[in-house]
């Protein structure tokens, strides 16, 4: 019961982050470039609970935010990016070879690769791959920053959960 | 404690990104034609050295207007929700492209060499 409530909080947190993200204008006019704030919730889940919980909340978050903030045609992009990035982050974390910041950086870059692959399936012209270096760079920078924030947030959440001990 | 590959990964990624940017810069000579593609099908190939406005309609009645002038193409008008295609600005070099994802539309610049015969026959 306690875990269900906690996971619900993460889902709400992820949705709020998605809403904030939608409010912030992106200075680069390239489809797919964004802050990736919601990845903070996903990566916290991955480290504090596990891959299964992160996957569950991530899918719920993607479907709900498609209904709330964007439209259904964007659902495919979000799913491709979100699932590929979570898969790669899980593998990177399990391997034990990467710090949290780099697991998050890997998540950011692979998220953008997933999206560009869907975009290619939609428009079917190679011209779209022109944006790959921009998307790799932006995914790496934002991913690293989110990973940085994760390392500040995780110990606070842990100690909060211990102190409250409901 | 397993070996940490952070730095190795960062180095490989940096090299890949730098190589891709460098390759784009080096191959980025002035192009000759704009290829317009929508729904995966080529709509047309237009010379960059003729002043021309092209309006492309989507299946559901929306539209984009391309403007070709002085060897450059830009998306002059679009009623897509994000308007990113307009903000992508002018393009003129080989390989550059403008993408309007909501309307499944791309504009790509190609070199003249492959299509010299067309250019002569015009």
Image (cartoon, coloured by chain):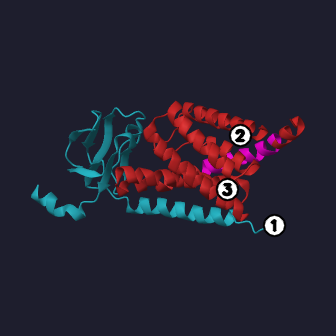
SS of the residue at dot 3? helix
Estimate the spatial distance between the alpha carbons at disc 1 and disc 2, rounded to whole Å.
30 Å
Q: Chain of mark 1?
A: B
Whether residue A32 can be seen here: no
Q: Nearer the viewer, mark 1 or mark 2?
A: 2
Q: Main secondary structure of the magenta part?
A: helix
As for residue A144 lying within the magenta part, the answer is: yes
Residue carrying label 1: B1
User: Residue A151 at x, y = what percent?
Assistant: 76, 48
Residue assigned mark 3: A103
The magenta segment is A141-157
Q: How far apart, in angstroms, are the residues tagged by discs 3 and 2? A: 21 Å
Tell me the residue at 40%/53% (across/down). Answer: A120
Find residue A38 and report its horizontal and vertical position in percent.
62, 41
| Chain represented in cyan | B
* Residues indicated by labels 1 and 2 sit on the same polypeptide chain: no
Q: Is residue A89 above or below residue A42?
A: below
- Reading the image, the residue beneath label 2 is A7
In the figure, the shade used to draw chain A is red
Which sits in the foreground, A108 or B89? Answer: A108
Secondary structure beneath label 1 = loop
Residue A143 position in % (x across, y down): 63, 49
3 or 2: tag closer to the N-terminus: 2
């Amino acid at each position: 019961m306690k875990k269900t409530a906690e996971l619900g909080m993460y889902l709400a947190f992820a949705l709020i982050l998605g809403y904030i993200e939608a409010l912030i204008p992106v200075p680069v006019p390239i489809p797919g470039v964004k802050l990736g704030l919601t990845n903070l919730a996903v990566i916290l889940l991955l480290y504090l609970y596990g891959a299964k919980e992160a996957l569950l909340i991530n899918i719920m978050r993607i479907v709900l935010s498609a209904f709330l903030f964007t439209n259904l045609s964007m659902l495919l992009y979000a799913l491709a990016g979100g699932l590929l990035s979570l898969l790669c982050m899980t593998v990177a974390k399990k391997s034990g070879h990467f710090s949290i910041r780099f697991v998050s950086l890997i998540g950011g870059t692979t998220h953008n690769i997933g999206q560009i692959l869907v975009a290619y399936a939609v428009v079917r012209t190679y011209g779209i791959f022109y944006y790959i270096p921009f998307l790799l760079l932006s995914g790496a920078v934002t991913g690293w920053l989110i990973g940085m924030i994760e390392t500040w947030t995780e110990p606070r959440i842990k100690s909060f959960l211990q102190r409250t001990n409901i | 404690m397993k070996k940490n590959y952070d730095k190795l990964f960062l180095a490989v990624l940096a090299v890949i990104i730098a190589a891709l940017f460098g390759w784009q810069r080096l191959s980025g000579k002035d192009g000759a034609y704009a290829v317009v593609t929508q729904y995966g099908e080529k709509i047309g190939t237009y010379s960059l050295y003729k002043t021309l406005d092209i309006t492309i309609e989507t299946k559901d009645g929306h539209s984009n207007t391309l403007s070709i002038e002085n060897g450059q193409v830009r998306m002059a008008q679009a009623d897509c929700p994000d308007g990113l295609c307009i903000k992508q600005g002018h393009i003129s070099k080989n390989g550059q492209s403008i993408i309007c994802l909501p309307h499944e539309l791309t504009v790509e610049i190609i070199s003249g060499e492959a299509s010299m015969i067309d250019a002569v026959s015009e």
